[in-house]
Image (spheres, helix red, strand yellow):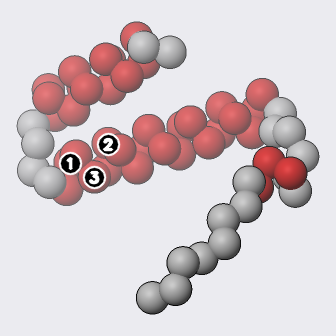
């Protein structure tokens, strides 16, 4: 495979609003929870992981 050219997309995108950023964070967190649940982790473990992520913000 030949190397692909990589460009910084920030050059082509407008800055996001606070609301868009919050929606993105919610979507990412929901995907994280779904992935952990589908991997068979216990609810308490997932809750602890989410709490840890929210505390680091």
Judge whether 18 appears above or below 41 on screen: above
Mark 2 touching mark 3, by CB under 8 A? yes
Q: Viewer-proximal residue, 7 or 18? A: 7
Q: Viewer-proximal residue, 10 or 7? A: 7
Q: Which residue is mark 2?
A: 33
Mark 1 touching mark 2, by CB under 8 A? yes
Q: Which residue is mark 3?
A: 35
How far across and how far down the image is residue 21, in percent?
69, 35
Residue drawn at x 25%, y 26% as measured from the top left: 49
Q: CA distance from mark 1 to mark 2?
A: 6 Å
Q: Viewer-proximal residue, 5 or 52? A: 5
Q: Which residue is mark 1?
A: 37
Residue drawn at x 28%, y 52% as measured from the top left: 35
Residue 54: numbered disc: none
Mark 3 secondary-structure assignment: helix
Mark 1 secondary-structure assignment: helix
How far across and how far down the image is residue 16, in percent?
81, 39
Q: CA distance from mark 2 to mark 3?
A: 5 Å
């Amino acid at each position: 495979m030949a190397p692909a050219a990589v460009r910084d997309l920030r050059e082509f995108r407008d800055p996001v609003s606070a609301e868009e950023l919050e929606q993105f964070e919610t979507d990412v967190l929901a995907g994280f929870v779904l992935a952990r649940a589908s991997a068979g982790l216990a609810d308490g473990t997932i809750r602890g992981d989410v709490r840890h992520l929210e505390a680091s913000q």
